[in-house]
Every structure is written in structure tokens, then in C-alpha cells.
Image (cartoon, grey):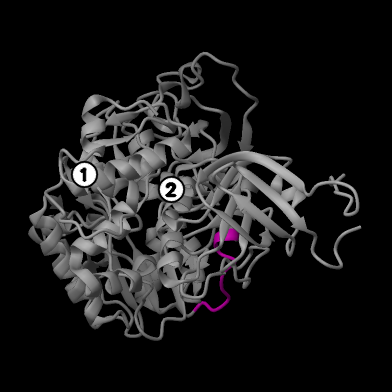
């Protein structure tokens, strides 16, 4: 079951983890249950996933809160996401679970608020299109508004 | 994270602004990982010279110092880049002049890279320009703490050599070069180096091709975990394990494996698991072998091959000798290109031994520094390529939108001579 706040009576749903890159941002979520690759996985010029068999193939993450399990693939991961920052195509924030050198360094050099190891599990709890706040100082992700037409 | 007095002095600027920026990045990185401290390293393999659109823009704004500050230190200040504090090498990068005009790869990128080489070599960076630094002058010893990038080199360093490195990135290696420090986390800790998974080969793993296919299977099964591998394994050589490790880090994210009785941290199966529980082995039999072969060969239909790519990871001297032997006195098909990628130092040896002459007289090329996947370029008009590398067969079709065949070296040479793919699983 997905924990669901009652819009009339309760506070927004909070996912508590550890903030690893500071800052606070509110944006729409883009959620995937599949690990993301840097080299051969994303196009930095357009901020899109280009791995042919990925469920986000062709989807743009620019300005979105990227919610994903973790990084896979080559050691160029951090460099590729750093390039999205330099090219103006970076995600607005990152939320991931599996701590690897690739993903952690990537979040730092992308310089976007990042929360890791949050509970309840972000990829199970947050849905694409939800408006979320990522607080990289406090290590909290808050679902502010559910995506239209997907709740219930 | 606990910092020594020396590290605090670096952070506070006693060694200059670049070192302070490097220490700041290492502290942010180490704390995000949850590392308790940093560890000393005197062996860094990173990347600085490879051209990219973002790097070109930074270079045009403020020279190589600006590019290094932003990309390799995550620092926006104008700082001088001093000499590297510890031995550092440049891994593979873009094509060099030997590949000029052979592909649509821009001549300006070759020039830009040449310029970067001057800047960084003046600061003590050894331009090894290969994904296999362990073949040409950077051979870590067992237990040595390293800060390496390049997944195929990382897995070789940890597994075959018994040195210790995580899969680092451009910024962490850049900071390690200027400080001689890297977070003491992950593969640096002895307790994180024991096997977690067990795979057993029930078919003989006794050829370069079989080591690659088996590695591709192992990576697919264990993903980021640490496999021990047993079964009918023939004694591998450097090229076999270079191929095997690269494949495990392609279909999965393996950074460390053990071959009990072969690799240095696993004298026995029990030692590979540190005396802990040994799981039931996952078998690799004829059916799995065929499935891997079919996966790697499911990326094309046309048997008209126009490009053969050998040397991924960069070819060893033995591999160059073998290619030369198979091509001696023959001539490759007029519509086919054949490249062997190798480190510059080994090409010098190949020149001296006559291998380069034999390969060139047959119509092939011995090239250095890069590969078609890194430089995102192949000979113009390439539609179908063939390779003996599981890694290149995996990546190149996605990167260049071309078809691929994967087979033995002999099958690749046959395709080069005839222009037709006639390979098959034996």
C-alpha cells in the first residue's frame, strides 16, 4: 500500500533520509525504478535519457526532481551529470537510495539538493508528476501535491 | 569526518587555493559517502585532457586552469593549478593525430586535446592515454590505495592486482591528485573486499572469447556485488582477465571479483569469502553461454561488415602480435576498415617488432589514445562493425546507431579479409 495523506486533515507526506547536497527546491518529480547510466545513458545537451531499453528512454529530466534507485555503468557518471549543470539541462534535485561513489560524486558536482536513503522508499512512494520539496539541509522530501489523475 | 592536522591545513589554504578547493571537495564527498576519514594515495588515474563541449567553453573562458577548477575540483574561483602532489596519469581520451581524417571526429578536438596535454604534462600528469594504465607504467602493488577511474581499469586494479580503489570520477581524481587523499570508504576497507556471490562455470572457460562472454554473464547476475568465480577455468592471461573484468563492469557494475587460486586475495574459496558463509553457486552452462552469445549478437542482421574494431580494452603486446600473425602476407577487403587500439607505449613496441608494418601492409591500422566509443566516431559510412570485445559490442551500437557482430579474433580477421561475417558459436 502507498501511504496517502488525506488532503483535508493531515500534513503532507514526508520521506526522511540523509541530505548529502544542501539546498531546498520544489519541483515536479520524475520517478524510475531502473538505475540510470551516465556514459551511454543520458544526453547532456538535451537532458534526456537515451539508453534504448530504459523505461525513461527519451524522457527529459531537466528541472525535475529525479527519483531513482541509483547509478550504474561507467565511471564517467559524475562527469556526465556535471555536464548537465554546465549545459543548463540538469535536474532540479536528486533522490536516490543506493550509495555509490558514482551517484554521490555526481550529485555533488551537479550541485542540486540531494537526499539519500529516505523512508518510506521514494521510488515506491513518489509518483511522476507529484510536486515535491527536496530539503537537502534537513534530509527530507515532502510530497506537496499529488499528480492529477493518478491518485486514488 | 575526521581530519588530520595536515588535512585541516590543506582545507584552510596553507598549501594554496587549489589544494584548499581539492580538500573542500574531498570533505563534501567523504561526508556524503559517510566515510570516517580520508586515506593517503600516491596513485591517481583520472581524466583531464578529453575534449567535451562543456570543457571547450570553460577553456575559452579561462584557460585550462578554469577547466580544471570547475570540472576536476568543482570550484568556480579563478585559481592557479600547481604541479600534481602525487603521481597521476591521464586515462584514455579522444582521438589523437594518428586518427585525424579517418572519421568525422573534429580536427579542433584533436588540437584542443594536444594543448591540454601540454598544460597537464607540465604539471606532472603522465599522458598514458589508455584505459589500461596497468600495461604501460602504472602497475599498482597489492594493498596499494589508488584513486582510479575507468570501470575496466578499476576492476583489474582491485581484482587482478589486489590494489584498492573505488570507481572514482573526474572531480574526485582531480582532488586526489592535488592532495594525495581519497575517502577511506568502500573497496579501501578490508572487510568490504570479501566475495558476496558465487558463480560456477560448467563449460570450459579457455579462450579470450569465453572469458569475455563469461564476464558478461557474471556482471548481469551480480550487478554491483562482489562475485567469486569457480568451475572449469583454464589459466587466464592478462588479456583474458582484461576482457573478463571489462565485461563484468559493462553488463553490471563489478569493481572487485575473486578467482580462487588465481587472484591474489583469494588463495582459496574460503579466503574469498573471508571465512564467512559460502552461498550456493549460480551455474553457467551451455544454455547460459549460448544466451550471452545471442544477446551480444542480437544487434544486427546484415553480414556485410565494413569495420573491424580490436583492442577494447586497449590491446596487449601479445594481442598485437597475434593480429599481425593472422594478417601477415594478406590484404583486407577493399570495403573494410580494421583498427587495433593500443596504448602509445605498446605501439612503439609493435613498431619495433614489425607488427605495425605487417598490420599496415595488410590494410589495417594500429591506433592509440582512444576508441570509437570514447570518441563517438567510426569510419564514415560504417553500418556494420565486428569486434572480439564484449564491452565494445555492448556500447558501440547504442552510441553510434550501427549494427554489431561479436566473435573470436580469427572470425574478426576473416570478416576483415572477406567483408562478410561468418562467425558462429563453437
Task: Point out residue A4 in the picture as x, y percentages from the top left corner.
Answer: 86, 48
The residues tagged by marks 1 and 2 sit, at their Cα atoms, a distance apart of 18 Å
**Residue sitting farthest toward the top:** B275
Residue A142 got which mark?
none
Name the residue carrying label 2. Answer: A105
Task: Point out residue B365 in the picture as x, y percentages from the top left corner.
Answer: 23, 71
Q: Secondary structure at mark 1?
A: helix
Residue B301 is inside the magenta segment: yes
Q: Residues within 10 Å of mark 1 (few under 14, many from 20)?
A: many
- Of residue B57 and residue B159, the one placed in the foreground of this image is B57
Q: Is residue B389 left or right of residue B253?
A: left
Subunit that carries the residue with mark 1: B
Task: Point out residue B93 in the picture as x, y percentages from the top left corner.
Answer: 27, 62
Query: Label 2 near label 1: C-beta < 8 Å?
Result: no
Task: Give the magenta-colored segment's residue range.
Answer: B295-303
Q: Is residue A106 left or right of residue B169?
A: right
- Of residue A25 and residue A115, the one placed in the foreground of this image is A25
- Of residue A105 and residue B156, the one placed in the foreground of this image is A105
Residue B205 in sight from this viewpoint: yes
Q: Is residue B397 left or right of residue B99?
A: right
Q: Which residue is located at x 38 percent, y 61 percent?
A: B410
Q: How many marks?
A: 2
Q: Which residue is located at x 74 percent, y 65 percent?
A: A129
Task: Name the chief secondary structure element in magenta.
Answer: loop
Q: Does residue B13 sit above or below B302 in this rendering?
A: above
Task: Point out residue B387 in the picture as x, y percentages from the top left corner.
Answer: 41, 64
Name the residue carrying label 1. Answer: B19
Subunit that carries the residue with mark 2: A
Residue B362 in sight from this viewpoint: no
Q: Does residue A94 sit above or below B356 in this rendering?
A: above
Amino acid at each position: 500500500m502507498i501511504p496517502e495523506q488525506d488532503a483535508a486533515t493531515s500534513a503532507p507526506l514526508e520521506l526522511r533520509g540523509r541530505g548529502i547536497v544542501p539546498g531546498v527546491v520544489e519541483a515536479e518529480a520524475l520517478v524510475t525504478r531502473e538505475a540510470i547510466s551516465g556514459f551511454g545513458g543520458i544526453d547532456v545537451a538535451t537532458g534526456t535519457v537515451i539508453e534504448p531499453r530504459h523505461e525513461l528512454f527519451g524522457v527529459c529530466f531537466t528541472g525535475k526532481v529525479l527519483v531513482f534507485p541509483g547509478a550504474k555503468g561507467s565511471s564517467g557518471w559524475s562527469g556526465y551529470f556535471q555536464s548537465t549543470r554546465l549545459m543548463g539541462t540538469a535536474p532540479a534535485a536528486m533522490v536516490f537510495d543506493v550509495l555509490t561513489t558514482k551517484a554521490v560524486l555526481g550529485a555533488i558536482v551537479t550541485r542540486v539538493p540531494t537526499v539519500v536513503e529516505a523512508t518510506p522508499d521514494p521510488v515506491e512512494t513518489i509518483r511522476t508528476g507529484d510536486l515535491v520539496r527536496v530539503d537537502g539541509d534537513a534530509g527530507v522530501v515532502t510530497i506537496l501535491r499529488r499528480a492529477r489523475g493518478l491518485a486514488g | 569526518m575526521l581530519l588530520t592536522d595536515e588535512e585541516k591545513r590543506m582545507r584552510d589554504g596553507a598549501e594554496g587555493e587549489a589544494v584548499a578547493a581539492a580538500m573542500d571537495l574531498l570533505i563534501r564527498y567523504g561526508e556524503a559517502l559517510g566515510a570516517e576519514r580520508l586515506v593517503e594515495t600516491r596513485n591517481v588515474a583520472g581524466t583531464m585532457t578529453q575534449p567535451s563541449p562543456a570543457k571547450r567553453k570553460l577553456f575559452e573562458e579561462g584557460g585550462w586552469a578554469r577547466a580544471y577548477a570547475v570540472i576536476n575540483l568543482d570550484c568556480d574561483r579563478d585559481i592557479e593549478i600547481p604541479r600534481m602532489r602525487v603521481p597521476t596519469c591521464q586515462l584514455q581520451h579522444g582521438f589523437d593525430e594518428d586518427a585525424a581524417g579517418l572519421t568525422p571526429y573534429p580536427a579542433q578536438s584533436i588540437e584542443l586535446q594536444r594543448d591540454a596535454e601540454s598544460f597537464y604534462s607540465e604539471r606532472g600528469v603522465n599522458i598514458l592515454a589508455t584505459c589500461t594504465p596497468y600495461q604501460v607504467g602504472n602497475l599498482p602493488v597489492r594493498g596499494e590505495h589508488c584513486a582510479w577511474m575507468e570501470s575496466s581499469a578499476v576492476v583489474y586494479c582491485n581484482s587482478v592486482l589486489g590494489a584498492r580503489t573505488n570507481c572514482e570520477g573526474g572531480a574526485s581524481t582531480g582532488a586526489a591528485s592535488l592532495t594525495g587523499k581519497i575517502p577511506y570508504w568502500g573497496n579501501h576497507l578490508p572487510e568490504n573486499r570479501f566475495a558476496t556471490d558465487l558463480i560456477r562455470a560448467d563449460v570450459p572457460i579457455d579462450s579470450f572469447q569465453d572469458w569475455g562472454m563469461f564476464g558478461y554473464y557474471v556482471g548481469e547476475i551480480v550487478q554491483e556485488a562482489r562475485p567469486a568465480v569457480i568451475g572449469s577455468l583454464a589459466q587466464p592471461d592478462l588479456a583474458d582477465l582484461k576482457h573478463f573484468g571489462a565485461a563484468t563492469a559493462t553488463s553490471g557494475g563489478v569493481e572487485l571479483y575473486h578467482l580462487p587460486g588465481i587472484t591474489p586475495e583469494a588463495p582459496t574459496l574460503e579466503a574469498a569469502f573471508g571465512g564467512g558463509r559460502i552461498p550456493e553457486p549460480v551455474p553457467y552452462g551451455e544454455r547460459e553461454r549460448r544466451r550471452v552469445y545471442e544477446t551480444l549478437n542480437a544487434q544486427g542482421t546484415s553480414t556485410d561488415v565494413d569495420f573491424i574494431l580490436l583492442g577494447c580494452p586497449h590491446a596487449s603486446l601479445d594481442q598485437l602480435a597475434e593480429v599481425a600473425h593472422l594478417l601477415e602476407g594478406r590484404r583486407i577487403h577493399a570495403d573494410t576498415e580494421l583498427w587495433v587500439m593500443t596504448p602509445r607505449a605498446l605501439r612503439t613496441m609493435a613498431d619495433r617488432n614489425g607488427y605495425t608494418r605487417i598490420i599496415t601492409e595488410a590494410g589495417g591500422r594500429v591506433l592509440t589514445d582512444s576508441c570509437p566509443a570514447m570518441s563517438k566516431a567510426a569510419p564514415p559510412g560504417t553500418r556494420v562493425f565486428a569486434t572480439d570485445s564484449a564491452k565494445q559490442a555492448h556500447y558501440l551500437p547504442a552510441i553510434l546507431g550501427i549494427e554489431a557482430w561479436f566473435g573470436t579474433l580469427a572470425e574478426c580477421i576473416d570478416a576483415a579479409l572477406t567483408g562478410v561475417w561468418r562467425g558462429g558459436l563453437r
